[in-house]
Image (cartoon, helix red, strand yellow):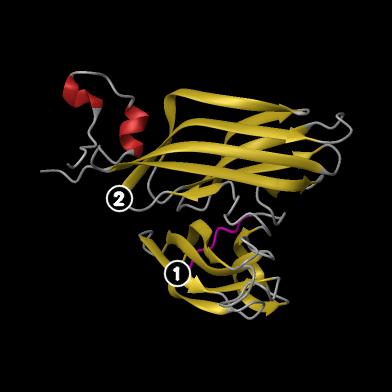
Amino acid sequence: MTTPFVSQTQYGKNEAFGLQISRGQIQGHSSVIVFGYNPDVDTTEESVWPDGGTVPHPTVASVLKISSSSANDTSAGTGARTVVIEGLNGDYNVVSESVTLNGQTAVNTVNSYLYVNGFYVASVGSGGENAGNINAGTGVVTAGVPAVLYDIIAAGYNNRTTGHYCVPAGYTGYMTEGLFSAGQASGTTAVTGFLKQHGTDGILRVGAVSTVNNSAAVYMFEQPYVIPEKNCVGATAIGSASNNAVSSYFSIILIKNSTGY
């Protein structure tokens, strides 16, 4: 006998809106969870991602070079063997693909990417995780590291921890909650975090600012923070002193725009 998996609303009971979205029960709606982590924020503003520096905002979509800092991340290696990359092309439409790794030697993507929204390990060897940093970028690749980095999977993480997301064409993002946290061994360093939004006009706008000291700032948006199509949001941070561990979190509901009648 087949067991039906149905919404409780069919029995006259209430079911959380967010749960229905995650279950794929509401047409044109999807949930997006974005985590970011930077283990070493210093006194220059950086994106909340493992690389330091800032996530680029290019104007032209490019074929990306996928490579690892470790020779063990290869098709028959002990580390990561394949990865999946998802992002937006030059028209801000969603594109994705699977890439078989070749250690420190770059493998080109089939698609061209303007932004990366998803990047994760899909298969591994006996080590169970990526042995090195897996990089997606452009330019000359040296020891597995491209000159311009678009995204990164830190060694051992099997998934990107990049606090950055771009809304595809034809959709609007609604951020319902967010978090910014920072800590350091001394416990005396203030860290300032920024929520920044970037659109097709090229202007980077600050949406929120938090200053914490070994603590977290939590945002619950009763009226969700709106991210229009083709706009990106990202977390950045700067410390009053060096060596701060910083993390960020966004919860976004992605809704397909109405097309009229």
Among numbered discs 1 and 2, the one appearing first in the sequence:
1
- The nearer-to-camera label among 1 and 2 is 1
Task: Name the residue: 54% across, 63% down.
Answer: 58
Q: Residue furthest front?
A: 1
Which image quadrant for residue 140?
bottom right
Q: Residue furthest left?
A: 261
Determine if residue 143 is in view: yes
Task: Name the residue: 64% across, 63% down.
Answer: 130
Task: Please say if 89 is above or below 39.
Answer: below
Can you give x and y, in whole percent of width and height, for residue 143 in the image?
73, 76
Left or right, residue 258 beside residue 72: left
Left or right, residue 102 beside residue 211: left
Q: Name the chief secondary structure element in magenta.
A: loop
Q: Which residues are magenta?
A: 55-61
Can you give x and y, in whole percent of width and height, for residue 16 in the image?
34, 24
Which amino acid, mark 1?
A: Ser
The quarter of the image holding the C terminus is: top left
The quarter of the image holding the N terminus is: top left
Task: Please say if 260 is above or below 73.
Answer: above
Distance Cα–Cα, label 1 vs label 2 = 24 Å
Give the numbered dot on residue 170. Answer: 2
Left or right, residue 140 beside residue 41: left
Task: Name the residue: 62% across, 75% down.
Answer: 77
Q: Mark 1 Cα within 10 Å, few/some/many (few <14, many 20+)? A: some
Was residue 41 drawn as part of the magenta stretch in this picture? no
